[in-house]
Image (cartoon, helix red, strand yellow):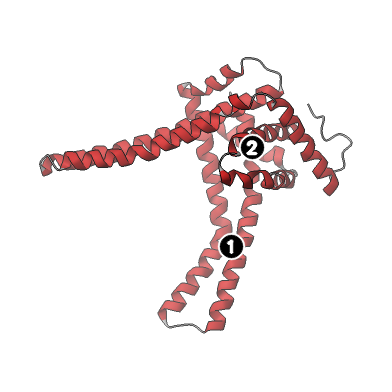
Amino acid sequence: FCILKKNMPMLILGDIMFFTEIQKYALKFNKKKYLKLMCVPLIYIIVLAVYCVTPFLLSSLSDLILAQISEKYSIVCSILKCLFILISGFSACIFYSTVSLGEEAGYSGRLSGKKNRFKRFIYWFRFKNAFKAFRLKAAVFFLKLFWTLVFMLPCILTFSVVLVTAFSGGIEAYLFSALMGGTVVLFTVGLIFRFIAIQRYFLAQFILAENPNDTVLQVIRKSKNLIDGQIFTVVKFKLAFLPFILPCLLFIPLFFIYPHYKQSRSILAKELTV
């Protein structure tokens, strides 16, 4: 499949050509299929709306019930409400992980010319596979959280010192300005390094979609090994999509840009794993 990078110098111009070719291939694969591909973002929006509205409805219903029953049963009702919210939140995470892996399997299957892409999507809704998808998402989330804490810690410490000093005995205006400026610089630098560091897990979901029998730990290790030396390629790929993502703030372009980005992402992942 490695047809894009051959004889293409990875300089600035080469990068532009490389990402342009990826986007052209994505458009080719998605041509006349956008109505079907819009289903996934619609599912996300509908499920998100349901899970956001449900706790409020449940809270209102429980308040009505609590007003009619004794204090003894009100405690039980409150506990049941908390349990329901926890269970619904956990099920929402599992559902998101399952749909995300199934979607990745569908996009990668199109690149390989595999048929029965719907079966590849449904495969991740099996109980065992759904929990594996959730474990991968959870593992990647906590790894990203770790890198966030590592690179944001200097900013947090500096900001804490500024606040403690300002509220304890006062601080000179010029010193306060200098420390706040340093905090902003540390925050910006931390965000940049954090963004670069988390790209180590860019291939994790793609690898699991292509190798469903691998364990979560194996998938993460493969992603880190394969992405070694290619992190800035992934960073530049995401930055190249920034002009496409900004119009999504208008919401409507989301249904066109989302499938385009996901297919382009899958093409790049395929390139990096060849």
The answer to whether any part of residue 274 appears in the image is: no
* Closer mark to the observer between disc 1 and disc 2: 2
Q: Position of residue 97 (x, y in %)?
A: 51, 33
- Can you name the residue that lies furthest to the right here? 7
In which quadrant of the rendered view does residue 219 lie? Answer: top right
Disc marking residue 121: none
Horizontal arrangement in the rendering, residue 47 relative to residue 28 (left or right): left
Question: Could you give the CA–CA distance between mark 1 and mark 2, rounded to whole angstroms?
Answer: 30 Å
Q: Secondary structure at mark 2?
A: helix
Q: Which residue sits at x=65%, y=55%?
A: 193
Q: Secondary structure at mark 1?
A: helix
Disc marking residue 187: 1
Q: Amino acid at mark 2?
A: Ile
Q: Which residue sits at x=14%, y=39%?
A: 73
Which residue is under mark 2?
Answer: 257
Q: Amino acid at mark 1?
A: Phe
Please identify the quadrant where the C terminus is shown. top right
Q: Position of residue 109 (x, y in %)?
A: 66, 22
Q: Which residue sits at x=57%, y=18%?
A: 118
Q: Position of residue 35 (x, y in %)?
A: 60, 26
Q: Is residue 107 placed above or below 149 in the rendered structure? A: above
